Image (spheres, rainbow, N blue to C red):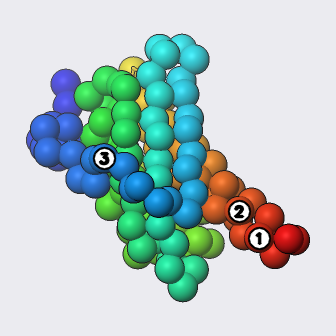
Amino acid sequence: MYNDNVIEHFLNPRNAGYIPDPDGIGLQGDPSCGDYLRIYIKVKKNRIADIKFEIYGCPAAIATSSALTELAKGKTIEEALKITDADIITFLGGIPDPKVHCSNLGAGALQLAIQDYQDRIAFKNNK
Ligand code: FES
């Protein structure tokens, strides 16, 4: 059902865990299955310097979250905001159709983490 790349990311997820002092956190859930993903980011010089994730989810959600962190690391904020579900699926070489919705968690959670980062900056600047 899953290709070798997806299975490899599922068995050895990259960047799993959390960042104790993150610059942004994004939490995205999938109401259809109850799974959820939390993304932590550290930003330096407008780039995603570090990114980690915690997940409660299926193998596809774990693999796509792992892929997302690889795609996002080192990217500028603007580039990271452009990462789509399709980019994640392409990076993994495809996932089975019934599992495509699982990739939504990654892109959505990253966008929320970046939003949180931008909100924190705006809050600091308005103090
Ligand atoms: Fe819920 Fe995959 S089945 S994220």
Closer to viewer: mark 1 or mark 3 = 1
Quarter-of-image position of residue 23? bottom right
Cβ of mark 2 under 8 Å from ligand 1: the answer is no
Q: CA distance from mark 3 to mark 2?
A: 22 Å
- Residue 23, disc: none
Establish if 39 lies above or below 97: below
CA neighbours of label 3 inside 10 A, class few (<14), some (14 to 19), many (20+): some
Q: Residue 118: horizontal and vertical position, in percent?
A: 70, 64
Q: Residue 33: horizontal and vertical position, in percent?
A: 47, 14
The residue tagged with tag 1: helix, strand or loop? helix
Left or right, residue 105 beside residue 126:
left
Q: CA distance from mark 2 to mark 1?
A: 6 Å
**Residue farthest right in this picture:** 126
Identify which residue is drawn at 47% across, 40% down: 38
CB under 8 Å between discs 2 and 1 = yes
Establish if 39 lies above or below 120: above
Give the labeled residue for mark 1: 124
Q: Nearer the viewer, residue 17 or 103?
A: 17
Q: Earlier in the sequence, mark 1 or mark 3?
A: 3
At label 3, which amino acid type do we have? Answer: Gly
Give the labeled residue for mark 3: 17
At label 1, which amino acid type do we have? Answer: Lys
Q: CA distance from mark 1 to mark 3?
A: 27 Å
At label 2, which amino acid type do we have? Answer: Arg
The residue tagged with tag 2: helix, strand or loop? helix
Left or right, residue 30 beside residue 90:
right
Q: Residue 59: horizontal and vertical position, in percent?
A: 26, 28
Establish if 30 lies above or below 55: above
